[in-house]
């Protein structure tokens, strides 16, 4: 739909530094067209002062003024012919996007338990019997139950947790439900965690 007199941002040229807004970009574009170097210089200093007022959070940085002049150089596309008070040759590095981080892909048989629980399974397989191992079994079983409740995969009953724990530790961890008591997990805790995700 094209209505005369309406000008949408989606139809305008994309801004190089959107944090300063279109009006500052228009000022920079105007400064480029000024005929004399002195006029361009005076206009550039005025624009930098306005930029400083508009984005005060940059004032805390050590190289505050350098950043403002770098931003001005970027917004002008390095076409503003003035005596730059700082070296702006490295300004293009500001807009360079970092390399994407590699996401560690792991093959997890049951995703709702997560990779950390599977690390605990591996540790439990190797640990010698004792109080430390019993405590880790308790922590692991309770975390498994929380994960089942949080992700809502099937039932979160005690038998399921005991069965999965035995299966994923190759039968090395066997829990006797007559002796083992799970921690009480309130549904409100699980609901809060779900909403955070």
Image (cartoon, rainbow, N blue to C red):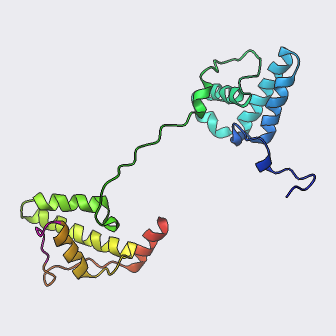
The residue at 23%/67% (across/down) is 140
The residue at 85%/29% (across/down) is 30
Quadrant assignment for the N terminus: bottom right
> Is 67 a magenta residue?
no
The residue at 87%/55% (across/down) is 2
The residue furthest left is 129
Q: Which quarter of the picture shows residue 123?
A: bottom left
In this orientation, which residue lies closer to the viewer: 130 or 106? 106
The residue at 90%/56% (across/down) is 3
What is the count of numbered marks?
A: 0
- 179 versus 49 height, above or below: below
In the image, 175: left or right of 5? left
The residue furthest right is 4
Write down the region rendered in magenta. Answer: 169-175
Q: Which quarter of the picture shows residue 181?
A: bottom left
Q: Which quarter of the picture shows residue 160?
A: bottom left
Q: Position of residue 78 (x, y in %)?
A: 71, 23
Q: Main secondary structure of the magenta part?
A: loop
Q: Position of residue 151 (x, y in %)?
A: 39, 72
Q: Position of residue 194 (x, y in %)?
A: 45, 70
In the image, 196: left or right of 61? left
Q: Position of residue 148 (x, y in %)?
A: 33, 74
The residue furthest bottom is 178
């Amino acid at each position: 739909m094209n209505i005369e007199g309406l000008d949408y941002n989606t139809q305008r040229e994309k801004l190089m530094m959107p944090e300063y807004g279109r009006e500052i970009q228009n000022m920079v574009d105007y400064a480029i067209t000024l005929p004399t170097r002195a006029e361009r210089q005076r206009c550039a200093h005025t624009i930098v002062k306005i930029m400083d007022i508009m984005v005060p959070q940059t004032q805390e940085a050590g190289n505050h003024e350098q950043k403002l002049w770098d931003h001005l150089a970027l917004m002008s596309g390095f076409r503003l012919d003035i005596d730059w008070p700082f070296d702006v040759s490295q300004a293009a590095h500001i807009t360079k996007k970092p390399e994407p981080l590699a996401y560690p892909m792991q093959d997890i048989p049951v995703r709702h338990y997560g990779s950390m629980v599977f690390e605990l399974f591996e540790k439990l397989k190797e640990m010698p019997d004792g109080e430390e191992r019993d405590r880790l079994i308790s922590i692991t079983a309770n975390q498994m139950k929380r994960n089942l409740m949080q992700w809502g995969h099937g039932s979160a009953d005690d038998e399921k947790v005991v069965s999965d724990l035995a299966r994923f530790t190759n039968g090395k961890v066997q829990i006797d439900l007559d002796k083992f008591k799970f921690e009480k997990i309130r549904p409100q805790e699980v609901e809060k965690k779900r909403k955070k995700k």
